[in-house]
Amino acid sequence: MSLITSAIGQGFLWGILGIGLFLTFRILDFPDMTVEGTFPMGAAVCVAAISHGVSPILATLLAIIIGMVAGLVTGLLYTKGRIPILLAGILVMTACYSINLRIMGTSNISLLGKQSLFTNHLLESLPKYFDSVSLGLLIVIIVTIILAMFLQTNLGQAFIATGDNETMAKSLGIHIDSMKIMGLMVSNGLIALSGALVAQSDGYADVNMGIGIIVIGLASIIIGEVVFGNLSMNQRLVAVTCGSILYRFVLLIVLQLGFSTNDLNLISSIVLALCLMLPTFRKALHLDRFIKNGVKTPLPDKKVRDHD
């Protein structure tokens, strides 16, 4: 039971990463490699600040701000410097590695004996692992509600329109460069928040904890879409978090089967590849012709198929 509770709690904390990546990958429709730098940067800033006596709440806010700054740099390189988004993200991601080392002064920092968001009296009184479930759920609800409300505003609709059709958005007077920069800032701010929360939950920050992060975020998005199908924008935000929890259960099952933790990145890539190829498999096997409204209909006989 404790393993299941832990998986759900981690799913909530990592789900914020998926929500942040959803803004750029699905709405703006481009991959942002900055995430592999801003996730550990959020963790590094938060843990380093707490180690120097800063309150956990303020340290977490600092992590969000530094993540937004990294997103701003990527956005400026992309929109003003005319550097391709993939390369701009890689440049900032690479720079973040050195910055993280500067912030921490070493490759990793422990929170042993330090206060964090997970060490207050209320959360410590809960059963094991319920602290991450409670705090993670609360923060996910707040983030999801704020984003859902934002996307219903005129600014939010302009942001969505920019991802849907840049030419149309520009003809409507929308400043698409500003929308892209804003999206990158909000996205990386949320990703840094996820890094800060995961670091506080695990009790340490490591300079290499960003490796493979983009695969984890994409897995949350894709699994949520595959499992829940066509959804509204607000429902898709919720589906990302559910996808993150399901992904954690997949990893839990894999570990229970005897695989090493060193194989997790490989397994994550395989799971994501299978989910991405699922539509291709369905088309190749003609499953869409025989599945309607969730009920499988009988295959036509051979004569009918030959006639077709």
Image (cartoon, rainbow, N blue to C red):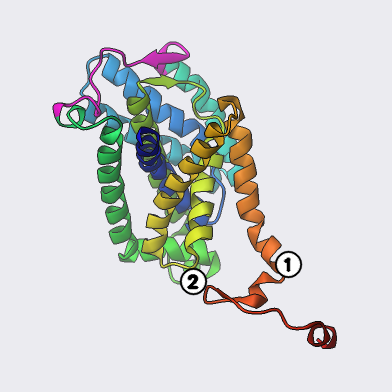
- Tell me if residue 211 comes above or below residue 189 in the rendering: above
Task: Indicate the quadrant containing the C terminus: top left, top right, bottom left or bottom right.
Answer: bottom right
- Tell me if residue 125 comes above or below residue 307 in the rendering: above
Tell me which corner region of the image, top left, top right, bottom left or bottom right, holds residue 46: top left
Left or right of 272: which side holds 161? left
Q: Which residues make up the magenta segment?
A: 103-121
Left or right of 16: which side holds 25? right
Where does the image place residue 73, in percent across and percent down from the top left? Answer: 47, 37
- Write the residue at 73% across / 83% down: 300
Left or right of 277: which side holds 25? left
Q: Amino acid at mark 2?
A: Ser
Where is mark 2, residue-wise? 171
Tell me which corner region of the image, top left, top right, bottom left or bottom right, holds residue 259: top right
- Write the residue at 63% across / 35% down: 266
Q: CA distance from mark 1 to mark 2?
A: 42 Å
Left or right of 196: which side holds 221? right
Where is mark 1, residue-wise? 285
Look at the numbered disc 1 and give the secondary structure of its residue: loop
Look at the numbered disc 2 and give the secondary structure of its residue: helix
Magenta stretch: dominant SS? loop
Q: Report the disc number at residue 200.
A: none
Is residue 162 found inside the magenta-colored segment of the image? no
- Which class describes the residues within 10 Å of circle 2: few (<14), some (14-19), or many (20+)? few
Q: Earlier in the sequence, mark 1 or mark 2?
A: 2
Q: Amino acid at mark 1?
A: Leu
